[in-house]
Image (tube, helix red, strand yellow):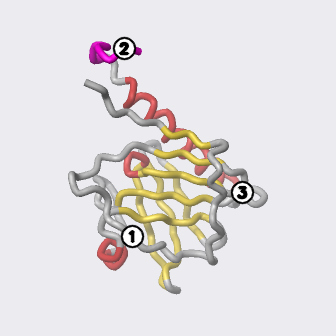
């Protein structure tokens, strides 16, 4: 494409983001339907804690004011998937918590069992994202393999 390409009147970037987030919804819907994760599958889901529609306990939003990563693996319950997001029960330091997360708030989805990852463009402020600690829910986390295979990363920044 040329540097002088006209701005599109079709919001392709939004359409692609919505379609990729639908992958997350479908995967979580499969887990909801069966009530369990198949095989060794487990998910790291990163989301913006301050995004519209996110509902998490205050102690978690104070600890993770910008972004948080949760793990759907060993101990989760009441997974409910709707068209616009999902809710799930997780344990943090032996304290149960219910989280409501819209798909629009998700910035990353990883299934390390099959080296699959999706990254979503997030609106960030001028200062950039703040560092955050690991969520520490479920069992100790294994590091996902990051060799780039099966990773979809979409950058929608426009050249002017």
User: Mark 3 = which residue?
Assistant: 113
Residue 22's label in the rendered image is: none
- Nearest to the eye among marks 1 and 2: give it: 2
Q: Residue at x 35, y 47 (%)?
A: 122
Circle 3/circle 2 CB separation < 8 Å: no
The nearer-to-camera label among 3 and 2 is 2
Image spot of residue 105 (x, y percent): 38, 51
Instruction: State the count of labels.
Output: 3
Q: Where residue 82 sits: x, y (%)?
A: 48, 47
Compared across the picture, whether 30 is left or right of 25 comes to right
- Identify the image quadrant of residue 137: bottom right
Dot 1: element: loop
Horizontal side, residue 160 vs residue 70: left or right: left
- What separation in Å lies between label 1 and label 3 (alpha carbons)? 24 Å
Q: Residue at x 30, y 26 (%)?
A: 159
Inspect the magenta stretch and tell me whether residue 105 lies in it: no
Secondary structure under the numbered disc 2 in the rendered image? loop
Q: Indicate whether 88 appears above or below 84.
A: below
Q: Which residue is mark 2?
A: 2
Q: Which residue is mark 1?
A: 132
Of circles 1 and 3, the one toward us is 1
Q: Is residue 76 above or below residue 20?
A: below
Name the quarter where the N terminus is drawn: top left
Question: Furthest residue to the bottom?
Answer: 94
The Cα–Cα distance between marks 3 and 2, rounded to whole angstroms, is 40 Å
């Amino acid at each position: 494409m040329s540097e002088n390409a006209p701005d599109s009147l079709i919001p392709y970037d939004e359409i692609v983001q919505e379609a990729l987030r639908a992958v997350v919804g479908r995967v979580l819907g499969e887990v909801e339907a069966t009530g369990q994760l198949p095989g060794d599958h487990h998910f790291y889901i990163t989301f913006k804690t301050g995004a519209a529609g996110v509902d998490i306990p205050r102690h978690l939003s104070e600890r993770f004011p910008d972004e948080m990563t949760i793990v759907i693996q060993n101990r989760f319950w009441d997974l409910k998937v709707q068209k616009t997001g999902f809710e799930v029960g997780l344990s943090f330091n032996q304290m149960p918590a219910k989280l409501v997360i819209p798909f629009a708030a998700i910035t990353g989805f990883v299934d390390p069992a099959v080296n699959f990852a999706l990254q979503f463009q997030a609106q960030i402020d001028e200062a950039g994202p703040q560092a955050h600690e690991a969520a520490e829910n479920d069992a100790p986390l294994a590091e996902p393999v990051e060799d780039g295979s099966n990773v979809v990363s979409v950058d929608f920044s426009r050249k002017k």
